[in-house]
């Protein structure tokens, strides 16, 4: 069935399984080679805010185009304790995901915004749900099937945009609070040193 069928049949507060609105695949295993033509994205290539570090360099050769990532694809870190979801940005370089990621490619990015899905997957409650279902002995891992069966809400695009904007404002607020705390610390240290 198509994405539009699932979206049209979903009521405002109804949940839809992720595999009904996206293709989910595992990252590609590849080895570093000389004369690379593509970025090999790993968890360490993203900062704590989910932004791709500008120091990432090509390390592999990609011959099969089906593994190439597109802007707006989502990468969920499926291994370990930090299962953050990031959005593949617009970049000129070809890139592929390593096996530490599950790649989520939405069927219709105009009906379900990648930023909304990333926001939802990064919510503490969603992260806890995924963590409970993760399997493994030494390194916990989220399977493709587990992620595909995860139910997500799909509100109107306008409401999705509002959630995204509120999330951005909340992040900015946290950054400002951190900057204020750091500045207060510097002022206090300066005053203490001056009075010695």
Image (tube, helix red, strand yellow):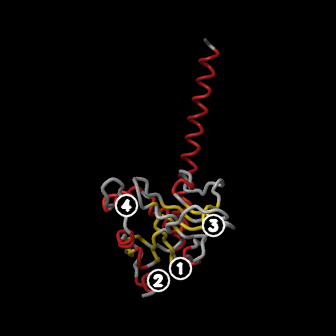
Q: Is residue 55 left or right of residue 141?
A: right
- Distance Cα–Cα, label 3 vs label 1: 26 Å
Quadrant housing the N terminus? bottom left
Residue 84: x percent and y percent? 47, 58
Task: Look at the numbered discs 3 and 4 and tell me whether their residues touch, using CB distance below 8 Å.
Answer: no
Residue shown at the point (61%, 69%) measured from the top left: 61
- Distance Cα–Cα, label 2 vs label 4: 27 Å
Residue 21: x percent and y percent? 45, 78
Indicate the secondary structure of the residue bearing disc 1: loop
Closer to the chain start, of discs 3 and 2, is 2
- Distance Cα–Cα, label 2 vs label 1: 7 Å
Q: Indicate which disc residue 108 carries.
A: 1
Indicate the secondary structure of the residue bearing disc 4: loop
Q: Indicate which disc residue 38 carries.
A: 3
Q: Please give the residue where the numbered disc 2 appears in the rendered image.
A: 3
Task: Look at the numbered discs 3 and 1 and tell me whether their residues touch, using CB distance below 8 Å.
Answer: no
Closer to the chain start, of discs 3 and 4, is 3
């Amino acid at each position: 069935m198509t994405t539009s069928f699932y979206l049209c049949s979903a009521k405002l507060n109804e949940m839809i399984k992720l595999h009904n609105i996206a293709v989910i695949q595992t990252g590609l295993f590849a080895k570093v080679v000389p004369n690379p033509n593509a970025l090999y994205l790993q968890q360490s290539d993203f900062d704590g805010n989910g932004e791709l570090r500008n120091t990432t360099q090509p390390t592999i050769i990609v011959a099969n185009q089906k593994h190439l990532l597109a802007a707006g694809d989502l990468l969920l870190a499926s291994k370990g304790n930090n299962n953050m979801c990031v959005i593949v940005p617009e970049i000129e370089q070809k890139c592929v995901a390593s096996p530490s990621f599950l790649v989520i490619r939405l069927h219709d990015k105009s009906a379900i915004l990648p930023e909304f899905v990333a926001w939802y997957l990064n919510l503490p409650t969603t992260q806890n749900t995924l963590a409970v279902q993760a399997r493994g002995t030494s390194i916990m891992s989220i399977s493709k099937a587990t992620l595909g069966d995860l139910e997500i809400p799909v509100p109107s695009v306008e409401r999705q945009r509002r959630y995204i904007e509120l999330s951005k404002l909340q992040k900015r607020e946290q950054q400002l609070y951190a900057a204020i705390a750091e500045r207060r610390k510097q002022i206090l240290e300066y005053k203490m040193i001056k009075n010695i």
